[in-house]
Image (cartoon, helix red, strand yellow):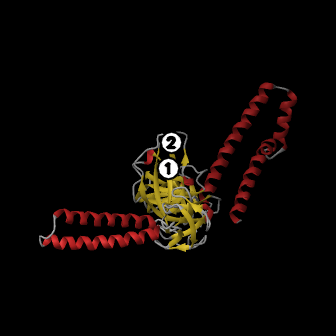
Amino acid sequence: MKIKHTQQISTMKKLAILLSIPLLFLSCGNNEEGKSIDQLIENENLTEIKAKKAELSKEQSELTQKLDKLEQAIERLDESRRLDLVVIQEVGDTLFKHYTEVQGDVATDENIIIYSEFSGILEDLRVKEGQRVNKGEVLAIIDDGGLSSELAQLETQANLAKTTFERQKRLWEQNIGSEMQFLEAKTNYESMLNSVNRLESQLEKTVVRAPFSGIIDEIFTEEGEVVSPGQSRLFRLVSLKNMYVEAAVPETYLSKINKGTDVLVKISSLEREFEGKVKRVGNIIDPNNRSFTIQVAVPNENGMVRPNQIATLKLNDYTAENAVVIPENAILKNAQGESVVFILEEKEGKQNIGIAKRQIVETGYSYNNKIEITSGIQSGTTLILEGAKNLRDGQEVKIRN
């Protein structure tokens, strides 16, 4: 407030002096000068009037120059005058990462529909929707239509064929009996074994098991219904452990995105953002949109991430160590379109007073309101962050704490 008050007094004094100049010329300390001007006007002598006017104008110009010099001296000597306030920051080295954003969908390879592999009646449904099951656990049993009885008979016949074959083998090793008898017994036994194995394989299809650990998300059929192989849907089994985000990335980033590239994953519906890495990069460019696919693993400890959720991927396509990075709003543009910043040079002997210097810089990538400076300023430079828009090169400024 004191600075503002002093400046107002100085301005008012200057204005008062300027306004008093015409009166000074009119009076000149006595009435005789005034009368002489009046007399010149009354005489209507144009030449003398112009001469008088030129004389007074010259005196006025000389006084104005003297006043300007006095004002400059006041500005130079008056420490309380108002200076432009600036906010500064010392520039340091930092790790700079640039990211490009793409949209993707949450997915999992362990999200399947389990179909029936055997034709028959679903006689035993052992799970409910939302139930967690382990790999290999029995989910349902289909009526085998007498297949188990047939298997029991075949196993009996297979045991008999085995006994016959072993007996013929012993006789053959003792050179008793013919080779044909031995080969017939062997062939019969092997045939019976194949039949038993084939029937066991068929019977195994009547038992529906979980191919992996997960959650029964949907049940599509009920007990007592007839199911057919490859046509009847039984369950949807989902695992929320091995989740990932799949996204299409423009082919221009093919050389920048690799397996292991850092990624920031944001799922807006959960208001979550976490770090991840690219776990797979596609080997084909889609000719329709000129892009390739990537997969990014998604942690899901609490099970809140679900398939088909929309996710935003921020892919780290550029990294610079020991980079000079400044706020993007500190960059100005000159008439030539060059990037300009103002830096501060300290003024010796004056606290919180400095000189603003204009500096042309070269810029690199920008991200999250930060921009990399590739040349023009170095680490340790004092940068003017705020108040630079109206500054002139070499202008004296005051630092705002």
Secondary structure beneath label 2? loop
> What residue appears at the point 33 percent right and 70 percent down from the top-left corner?
158
Q: Position of residue 274 (x, y in %)?
A: 52, 66
Q: Which mark is residue 289?
A: 2
Left or right of 12 on screen, residue 134: left
Q: Position of residue 203 (x, y in %)?
A: 45, 67
Left or right of 313 on screen, residue 198: left
Can you see residue 271? Answer: no
Along the line of sight, the residue nearer the viewer: 313 or 169: 169
Secondary structure beneath label 1? strand
Residue lying farthest to the front in this orientation: 177
**Label 1, residues with CA under 10 Å away: few <14, some 14-19, many ≥20:** some
Can you see residue 373? Answer: yes
Along the line of sight, the residue nearer the viewer: 7 or 86: 86
Q: Residue 261 sits in which quadrant?
A: bottom left
Along the line of sight, the residue nearer the viewer: 230 or 194: 194
In three-dimensional space, the C-alpha distance between marks 2 and 1, rounded to whole angstroms, equals 9 Å
Q: Which residue is mark 1?
A: 248
Image quadrant for the N terminus? bottom right
> What residue appears at the point 20 percent right and 65 percent down from the top-left corner?
181
Q: Amino acid at mark 2?
A: Asn
Q: Which mark is residue 124?
A: none
> What residue appears at the point 62 percent right and 49 percent down from the top-left corner?
69
Q: Residue 6 sits in which quadrant?
A: bottom right
Along the line of sight, the residue nearer the viewer: 171 or 341: 171
- The correct choice, above or below, for 214 with respect to 354 in the image is below
Q: Are marks 2 and 1 in contact (CB under 8 Å)?
A: yes
Residue lying farthest to the right in this orientation: 42
Q: Position of residue 3 (x, y in %)?
A: 68, 63
- The correct choice, above or below, for 259 with respect to 351 in the image is above
Q: Amino acid at mark 1?
A: Ala
